Image (tube, coloured by chain):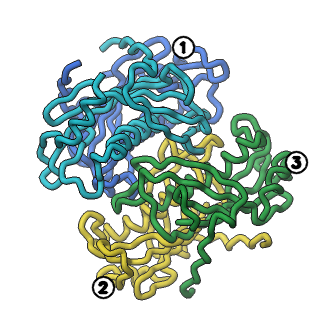
Chain colours: A green, B cyan, C blue, D yellow
Amino acid sequence: MTSRAKPKRSTTNDYARFYSITTRWHDNDVYGHVNNVTYYAFFDTAVNGLLIDAGVLDPASDTVVGLVVETRCSYFASLTYPDRVEVGVAVEHLGRSSARYRVGVFRAGENEARAQGEFTHVYVDRASGKAADIPAPVRAVLTEMRI
Amino acid sequence: MTSRAKPKRSTTNDYARFYSITTRWHDNDVYGHVNNVTYYAFFDTAVNGLLIDAGVLDPASDTVVGLVVETRCSYFASLTYPDRVEVGVAVEHLGRSSARYRVGVFRAGENEARAQGEFTHVYVDRASGKAADIPAPVRAVLTEMRI
Amino acid sequence: MTSRAKPKRSTTNDYARFYSITTRWHDNDVYGHVNNVTYYAFFDTAVNGLLIDAGVLDPASDTVVGLVVETRCSYFASLTYPDRVEVGVAVEHLGRSSARYRVGVFRAGENEARAQGEFTHVYVDRASGKAADIPAPVRAVLTEMRI
Amino acid sequence: MTSRAKPKRSTTNDYARFYSITTRWHDNDVYGHVNNVTYYAFFDTAVNGLLIDAGVLDPASDTVVGLVVETRCSYFASLTYPDRVEVGVAVEHLGRSSARYRVGVFRAGENEARAQGEFTHVYVDRASGKAADIPAPVRAVLTEMRI
């Protein structure tokens, strides 16, 4: 395979909702910047947090839940604890049982993403693990986050 | 050894400074509550964050740094993502080269700590690892946090 | 309060069982050593892992579970990824509904702990959260780990 | 945008080297499986660990270091602590200053990846942050990992 073109760096205009996250001492790795893995923790926290805040996700009791089947992230510029982070979220694709989010990580107050990626949930029945339709209340919230 | 008495649950009055932290999806463990380990990440983040905010800690360049030599935590009540957390910090003991902090973890808006503990830094020369006096600017900040 | 005496550094003879853990890139923090918080992840992993391996803990389905009510750790010497770690575990106190473990973190092949601490579980009914007797199969395993 | 085809699930034959990792209690999230974020910690640990083991990476002192600019992961089947993990690594693309790895996460003893992805390092001068040629000893190791 060959080298791949990097995606165009996104701005706050490319997202429908934002979720605030504080960084932590140990987000920084030995190179003094927020470790690449931590950005995926930001993705998880922002996407699920927006659904919880909207009242359509209860991880303790929901019988149909979204499982992560694919994620990706491109890194443009580093963050460092104690930066404050704003995570932009929008829905890029909304299927019968899956939703793909666009996610961007911004230093609070900035307009250009320092990192951005995608995050795909497939909904399944929690007990059986079989694919399930996205519950109607979730779909209503995701529809508002389309871009 | 025998069983040990649990410490008295502290309140916001027992702390000198507070530091805000947002919880994350994966702070919750399989039992649905913030995992006990994560509270120590709150300690680390709050103590160092207050020093950074006061302008007396630069992890990238300081030649004398505080290393953690002892920590402890007692857990009274659980937290759950997406709770917001306030970490109370006070200096209980201030020696020539060491400082012991009292740390309390509160759900934002509450008066009683959900967990509390201690966190002890010993200052060392970063290159040699030998004990060093607490730098004067750090000492000035810590003195204001005595309780 | 005053400064406190550091506990005596333990050796492999002070533990009843050992659990192997591999370190990870991001266990290291900005100072280049395994972050203090990570040792508590070792505690959690070793104690629960020994119970799971003994067949007396199933986090997915057990109706009586051990919740962490108190932990502590003293740090004597640092570890650095990619060190391999052996965690020593012994039961120091075994009550009706609680167990306190002694835990030591060793670099594989060494005799002296690089860090050591305590870890206390209180057993509760998972649904109600009320204190419960330690289940008999767990107690049998813990009794063999007394020291 | 539309839905995307999932990549073909890889097997151990698709990788040049393997790196062993033990899972941890808190790798599991509230759904009882290793959290999606943790797989990226496996990637980081395996790629860097293989370079350290080969003697061509010293995070404490290297003046030219690999920074992560892009990662991705597809999830096929879950893992659960206390599973043991083998991470397969191969070099898919080797440029002048960048290397793209294929990474697969296997439950120890299995032939099909439970998750797989890509991990791209760009080498930079640590002080200036400017792109740098991959150091010759690193290149020699990566060339052996081409597939």
Q: On what subunit does the disc labeled 3 rest?
A: A
Q: Nearer the viewer, mark 1 or mark 2?
A: 2
In the rendered image, which residue does mark 3 sit on? A136
Pointer 2: residues within 10 angstroms few (<14), some, or many (20+)?
A: few
Task: Please tell me in which quadrant of the rendered image residue A13 appears.
Answer: bottom right
The answer to whether tags 2 and 3 share a subunit is no
Task: Please tell me in which quadrant of the rendered image residue D17 appears.
Answer: bottom left
Amino acid type of the residue that numbered disc 1 sits on in the rendered structure: Asp
Q: As rendered, which of C25 and B60 lies closer to the eye?
A: B60
Pointer 3: residues within 10 angstroms few (<14), some, or many (20+)?
A: few
Q: CA distance from mark 1 to mark 3?
A: 43 Å
User: Taking D45 as reference, is B115 above or below it?
Assistant: above
Residue C37 in view: yes
Left-right relation of B5 to A128: left
Q: CA distance from mark 1 to mark 2?
A: 62 Å
Q: Residue at x 46, y 76 (%)?
A: D16
Q: Secondary structure at mark 1?
A: loop
Amino acid type of the residue that numbered disc 3 sits on in the rendered structure: Ala
Marks 1 & 2, CB-CB < 8 Å contact:
no
Q: Nearer the viewer, mark 2 or mark 3?
A: 3
Amino acid type of the residue that numbered disc 2 sits on in the rendered structure: Ala
| Residue C133: mark | 1
Q: Residue at x 22, y 47 (%)?
A: B65
| Residue D136: mark | 2
